[in-house]
Amino acid sequence: MARRVSRRKMPRREDFQMKEQLKIEEGVFENRTMMRLRSFFTHGIISSLEFIIAKGKEADIYLADGGASVSDAFVAVKIFRLETSSFAKRADYINGDPRFGRMRPGISELVNVWCRKEYGNLKIAGAAGIHAPRPYLFNGNVIAMELIGDDEGRPAPTLKDSVLEDPEPIMDSILLQIGRLYVKGLVHSDVSEYNILIKEKIPYFIDFGQAVVLEHPMSKKFLERDIANMLSYFRKQYGIERDLGKALMQVTQGGATGVVDGGNTN
Ligand SMILES: Nc1ncnc2c1ncn2[C@@H]1O[C@H](COP(=O)(O)OP(=O)(O)O)[C@@H](O)[C@H]1O
Ligand SMILES: [Mg+2]
């Protein structure tokens, strides 16, 4: 289990809060998830779990209050559902990635690997200097990360739900960030208007579970699809015309230079 925060003895009040909270959560989460959630309290990542802020296909995202070991007031907790069966097709994003070897795991093991992969990919995104949530901790099917949102704990809207007054710089920043990630050897592989959040006119990438390293035999295809998705969204939504070939060149050859935008906040 990876952990970036220092272990620290939990104050009594947090200990009490955790016990009370876990009583409430019993019946909501299945046993393994409950046990894993406990470690997020004991490591001081969260002090209480609030409510679901978004329901994805395979995971639910909860808002949590930050614990003693994190400086953020709020933390996003992504909990992958263990009973999910649509996970099986995701094996394609794991097989072929040399970090994981060739495996034929069961669903629950697949979810764990997926979660570990998302955590590792978020670390690479941070090292690449792109805008993405800082990962805090993962355990099994649960991952805690920085909430991309406001001071009140409201999550930032997706690109899909945002109306951009000045869309072109945002599109350029997205392409530049895809390039930065590429230079660090990673392709997001699920870039869409649903997996980008807009906070204070800055695009943040989320949902890194399916991101692959360049050694993956499909990485170039995934990169092209990511860029094509963005060009098509900005064309349909904002009438911006860009040539796919040129954009691809720009991403693969100019990724290391240029300014993402006002600077990165990671
Ligand atoms: N770190 C975060 N901060 C704020 N909102 C988030 C964060 N992570 C996820 N969300 C919200 O939850 C939704 C689903 O998360 P995502 O990681 O895309 O899960 P899925 O794999 O189910 O698509 C996102 O569209 C976004 O609205
Ligand atoms: Mg998503």
Image: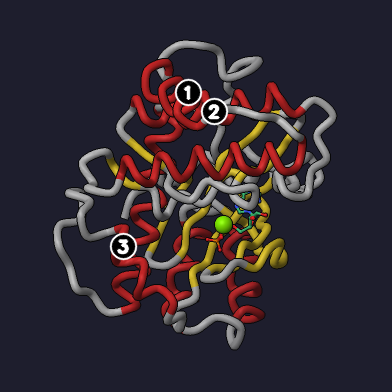
Q: Image quadrant of residue 23?
A: bottom right
Q: Residue at x 41, y 22 (%)?
A: 249
Disc assigned to residue 187: none
- Percent position of residue 51, x then y: 72, 66
- Percent position of residue 265, x then y: 60, 24
In depth, the one of 253 and 125 nearer the eye is: 253
Q: Image quadrant of residue 50?
A: bottom right
Q: CA distance from mark 3 to mark 1?
A: 35 Å
Quick one: which residue is furthest to the top in this view? Answer: 258
Q: Amino acid at mark 3?
A: Val
Q: Secondary structure at mark 3?
A: helix
Which residue is label 1 attached to? 246
Looking at the image, residue 146 sits to the left or right of residue 155; the answer is left
Residue count near mark 3 (Cα–Cα under 10 Å), binned few <14, some 14–19, many ≥20:
some
Which residue is label 2 attached to? 243
Q: Amino acid at mark 1?
A: Lys
Q: Residue at x 40, y 28 (%)?
A: 127
Q: Residue at x 22, y 48 (%)?
A: 217
In depth, the one of 106 and 79 nearer the eye is: 106
Whether residue 16 is visible: no
Eyeballing the image, is 214 above or below 48?
A: above
Q: Please state the quadrant of the image where ligand 1 appears.
A: bottom right
Q: CA distance from mark 1 to mark 2?
A: 5 Å
Proximity of marks 1 and 2: CB atoms separated by less than 8 Å = yes
The residue carrying mark 3 has its beta carbon less than 8 Å from ligand 1:
no
